[in-house]
Amino acid sequence: MRLILYLGKGGVGKTTTAAATAVRASELGYRTLVVSTDVAHSLADALDAPLGSLPTQLGERLWGQEINVLDEVRQHWGELRDYLATFLRRKGVDEVAAEELAIIPGMEEVVSLLHIRRQAREGDFDVVVVDAAPTGETVRLLTMPETFQWYASRIADWEPTTLKAARPFVKTLMPAVDIFETVQRLTRGVETLRTTLTDPEISSYRLVVNPERMVLKEAQRAATYLALFDYPVDGVVLNRVIPLEQAEGEFMQSLARIQQEYRKQVYDSFLPLPIWESPYYARDLRGIADLSMIGNALFKDVDPVKVQYQGKTHEITREGDEYVMRLPLPHVEIGKVSLVKRGDELFIEIGNFRRDMILPMTLSTRPAKRASFRNGMLEVRFGTDESALPADAPRQTPAS
Ligand SMILES: Nc1ncnc2c1ncn2[C@@H]1O[C@H](COP(=O)(O)OP(=O)(O)O)[C@@H](O)[C@H]1O
Ligand SMILES: [Mg+2]
């Protein structure tokens, strides 16, 4: 089974791309499910077919589904949440505060991913394409398993001392729920979920971008965090590119030219990942025939179900007091390396290659000390935390 997950800022074309990928996959012979977890569903609209909370068959090998995240949570988590709230109130926590504390952040997304995973197996699908929520939330969602385990272990910690004693009492209070069993089950579920979501043979994350500054920035941030938490990214969809030769008139010409600059930045930013481009279609896109056309134009002779890139796009390791970041840049020609770091942003130039990237928190407070570029690999060393030093002074780092 393969899981393909699309991420990107709202409006960039995730739903369209996810649906087009699914249609293409089904045409290639895969039993395909496309599922949306976005609260503001638009998958049914893109497919031009009514969808429900269970997979609806849309073609010989194509199914679509819109998960109602809130229903899912109520069904699978409601009891546990009520229980926690009751427990906290028993311990003297104020009514409203108890309700708040009982909400585990990110739980909804985890519950819907668990649901998707179970369903993918039960429905015997070859591939499940996930039309995910906007970038920020999704990245947090994906890092969720650890957070959840932390919460679960806190609850489990209560058990020996307080809860065990309270257990018979709680049982009479809520006889239908075995809370301990529920937490155990969820923890196990989340563990396997995490394993599935970080297995590069199963899961592939694809970023959807437009040739625009803010969209690109957000995608760079997502790429950094996905790499940091070991989620395998295998490609980028560059959507809504205005064809230069078709841009007539001064207005369209300048718009197309601006896009071309950001297009170059997209290539520099995500190399060595493959980048698939979709033109800006001057029409309303709807229904399976349109999606098939988009999917064909986007992937051409590439099989979108197969893993399209293997390996890490960046790697951060700790070596003694230093942190080392390594970026494979296989197609970049050797040239003088120049680095400028400003807060969490790192501007890299090697010859006429240029990459701006967002650093994870761990590195953003450390000075970039040395950079070297050898055998297609850029290596940047970060020194000790500089938060004690005067801030915002941009540093030029000597290259070796
Ligand atoms: N390449 C494109 N050309 C023209 N319109 C597009 C293109 N990609 C997406 N759209 C349209 O843009 C709107 C937003 O796309 P959608 O896929 O729903 O974005 P997201 O899911 O990222 O919010 C939809 O109306 C869609 O039909
Ligand atoms: Mg959408």
Image: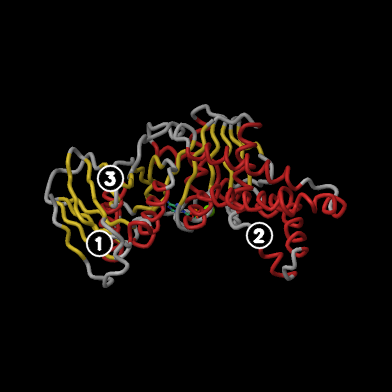
As drawn, which residue projects farthest toward the top?
Answer: 29
Q: How many marks?
A: 3
Above/below status of 214 relative to 299: below
Instruction: Judge whether residue 364 can be spotted in this image.
Output: yes
As drawn, which residue projects farthest toward the right?
Answer: 172
State the mark number for residue 326. Answer: 3
Q: Which residue is mark 2?
A: 103
Above/below status of 56 relative to 16: above
Depth check: 378 or 277 in front? 378
Say whether disc 3 or disc 2 marks the residue closer to the N-terminus. 2
Please state the horizontal and vertical placement of residue 57, each as a whole percent of the image: 65, 36
- Image check: 282 left or right of 243? right
> Looking at the picture, which amino acid does disc 3 mark?
Arg
Q: Residue at x 29, y 46 (%)?
A: 319
The secondary structure type at the circle numbered 2 is loop
Please state the horizontal and vertical placement of residue 174, each as a whole percent of the image: 84, 52
The secondary structure type at the circle numbered 1 is strand
State the separation of the CA atoms marked 1 and 3.
16 Å
Please state the horizontal and vertical placement of residue 248, each as a whole percent of the image: 29, 59
Instruction: Give the colouring mode of the picture.
Output: secondary structure
Please state the horizontal and vertical placement of residue 111, each as a whole percent of the image: 64, 48
